[in-house]
Amino acid sequence: MVTREKTERQTVLVLDFGGQYKELIARSARGLRVHSVILPGSTPAEEIRALAPIGIILTGGPFSVYSEDAPKADPALFGLGIPILGICYGMQMMCAALGGTVKPCEVSEYGVTEVRTVSPCVLFEGVGSPMRTLMSHTDYVSEVPEGFKVTAVTENCPCAAVACEERKLYGVQFHPEVERTRGGKRIIRNFLYKVCGAKGDYTMDAYIESTVRAIREQVGEGDIVLGLSGGVDSAVAAALIERAVPDRLTCIFVDHGMMRKNEGEEIRAAFGGRSLRLVCVDAADRFLGRLAGVTEPEEKRKIIGEEFVRVFEEESAAYEGCFLAQGTIYPDVIESGAIGGANIKSHHNVGGLPKESRFIGIVEPLRGLFKDEVRELGRKLGLPESIVGRQPFPGPGLAVRCLGEVTREKLDVLREADAVFREEMAKGGVKADQYFAVLTSVRSVGVVGDFRAYGYVVALRAVRTSDFMTCEYVRVPYAFLDRASKRIVDEIEGAGRVVYDITGKPPATIEWE
Ligand code: XMP
């Protein structure tokens, strides 16, 4: 949650020109203990001056600076005396605005590209040259504005970074905010600390304080209902909202019949003892009834999203003027295509919300955060490790791991296979950030004793990731897979064969649907 008022705390502004990494830039600043706020690229210079940021970062964007619809910063921005770092399109737009020239590249650069520094620049201190950077551009700055110098080049691009030290204006053609740019964090740190004079006064405590204030402002005297799924995100959102408006939060745990083995009991045990009101609803019949015959993943997600809201509405009927709270985090928003990107899958809490509902507003205090930040926040709020360290579990539950039509029979097989796999993973001490079983809709022939068997193919998946936006599959030892596979096929009726998923994200996603 961001507020537009000036704060005592130092703030860096991220001006958005449509690039897909704006939240990563804001998050990099937060990780470096500098408060960051994202505002539209067109925000007037006067408004920006009033906010008194210590620095401004201009994001990339998919435009060409000379095209008609290209978004531009207010030209007065460059005369405010505030340090500016332009990234990719942000650098080109700044250079064009100050009298430089931008042209199409002879050779466009996409992917990891080596950048060599050609002139000393404070941004590159401690980074080394050449650097491996992520590039994605078809235009470049062919003439720098007066007072600027080129500070880095690539094999194909004679202008990969620029600086006008006197005016504290800097630009980089590559993306320092992504992990694939080695030393990118150092470049942003240099800008914030060496150019902007950051003191590092932004901490998780400060985030809690400003978010608590924002929640109170948003809901006023209203009540809040929050869907508790048992995953980390909704638990942390509950703890944060509980801190803001302790007596007005009701948490509803909807058992939609697609929870993992023992999950319902675990959630009751973990949350039952807290000061918030916890309502548990057994809604398995109505969810499974609506999903009967449905096989298309997006349709399944939409139905579940809608049914969730209907249950929440019914359970919250006693409260007038009620808000719905959700533990939506930033990757959910990006993947649902809610902010201009492509729709990869509608996370039930983003794309699945029906247009008509009786809630007067949505409270999403984690919407700008990434998973690792959410865990850190949860620890700060005093949640136990058993909750904060939990694996993510998607809101639609096992429905997105039970491929094709969801039936009770398939869910039973899946639930047992998943429990065996998780038990073995815990016993074997295999390191993974998320691991689970998937029940494919494929059945295969086998032989049990002297008889023909025809059971489902179970897929196992274990991944390493920190942000859940990308992942690598875990190289699980064969001996371990062997044990898990034998147990699944021996112990679970209906499971006929076991396979292990060795696909990363991208191109796959973590869940199968
Ligand atoms: P994907 O499958 O998109 O998953 O690579 C990324 C992370 O998000 C979780 N996930 C969801 N979480 N509602 C959620 O709350 C959803 O609809 C949903 N779909 C996926 C997934 O388990 C992984 O951790």
Image: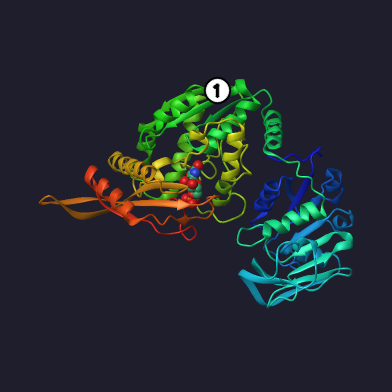
In the image, 137: left or right of 98? Answer: left
Give percent across and percent down for residue 477.
Answer: 36, 55
Q: Is mark 1 within 8 Å of ligand 1?
A: no
Give percent across and percent down for residue 488.
Answer: 27, 46
Residue drawn at point x = 49 percent, y = 26 percent? 271
Residue nearest the viewer, comparing 203 with 468: 203
Residue nearest the viewer, comparing 470 with 422: 422
Q: Quadrant of the N terminus?
A: top right
Q: Please, which colouring scheme is shown?
A: rainbow
Residue position for label 1: 276
In the image, 71: left or right of 389? Answer: right
Q: Is residue 271 above or below residue 297?
A: above
Q: Quadrant of residue 131?
A: bottom right
Give percent across and percent down for residue 219.
Answer: 66, 28
In the image, 400: left or right of 113? Answer: left
Q: Secondary structure at mark 1?
A: loop
Q: How many marks?
A: 1
Q: Quadrant of residue 446?
A: bottom left
Q: Is residue 260 visible?
A: yes
Mark 1: give few (<14), some (14-19) or many (20+) Cα within 10 Å.
Answer: some
Residue drawn at point x = 51 percent, y = 54 percent? 344
Q: Is residue 214 above or below residue 441?
A: above
Residue furthest to the left in view is: 450
Q: Amino acid at mark 1?
A: Leu
Give percent across and percent down for residue 503.
Answer: 42, 59
Q: Is residue 70 visible?
A: no
Residue furthest to the bottom in view is: 106
